[in-house]
Amino acid sequence: MLVRAIIIGLLGAALTALIAWSPIIPDPIIFHTVLLTMIGAIYMGFAFADGRPLIIILELSVATVFIVLSLLGLWVAPLFIGIGLILHGLWDLAHHPRGIKTKIPVWYPAFCAAFDFLFAGIFFYLARNIANK
């Protein structure tokens, strides 16, 4: 099950990156800013479904970090978006069975970490020539 989740995460990242850098997206940095914000907010939904106050506070706090990184990527330097994606991949891995105890599907951390790490790599590669905004 985890291997399938990783493969789907990698395919999803490749497809999303293809869309993000295609001519149909007028500003890839804004696209990535919105995506990092959404990715960061997913665990908030899991936390509210979980219902435990400490988990909600933890996940809301961490989601706020990703929102700040995405805005810094938009307003200061795109590098912050790539850093946010890598940190989110690490946050995914922290949700392993003996890690953070937010109630989430077993396959989700592997899927999301694979997505985040590949998507971050593609972002760093393709955004390398974008000047600070």
Image: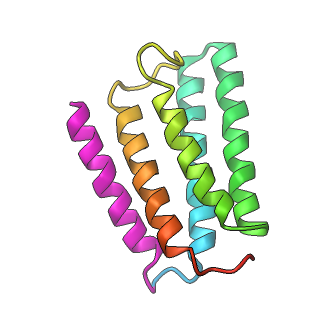
The coloring applied to the image is rainbow
Place of residue 95 in the rendered image (x, y in percent of width and height, measured from the top left): 48, 25
Q: Is residue 50 magenta?
A: no
Place of residue 113 in the rendered image (x, y in percent of width and height, measured from the top left): 42, 41
Q: How many marks?
A: 0
Q: Residue at x 68, y 58 (%)?
A: 80
Q: Is residue 11 magenta?
A: yes
Q: Residue at x 63, y 80 (%)?
A: 130
Specify the farthest residue to the bottom: 23
Q: Is residue 79 left or right of residue 76?
A: left
Q: Is residue 53 above or below residue 81?
A: above
| Quadrant in which the C terminus appears | bottom right
**Of 18 and 121, the residue lying toward us:** 121
Specify the farthest residue to the right: 76
**Of 47 and 83, the residue lying toward us:** 83
Q: Which residues are magenta?
A: 1-23
Q: Is residue 11 above or below residue 126?
A: above
Q: Is residue 62 left or right of residue 87?
A: right
Q: Is residue 44 above or below residue 17?
A: above
Place of residue 28 in the rendered image (x, y in percent of width and height, measured from the top left): 56, 75
| Quadrant in which the N terminus appears | top left
Place of residue 17 in the rendered image (x, y in percent of width and height, measured from the top left): 41, 67
Main SS class of the magenta portion in the image: helix
Q: Is residue 109 left or right of residue 43?
A: left
Q: Residue at x 38, y 57 (%)?
A: 13
Q: Is residue 69 above or below residue 65?
A: below
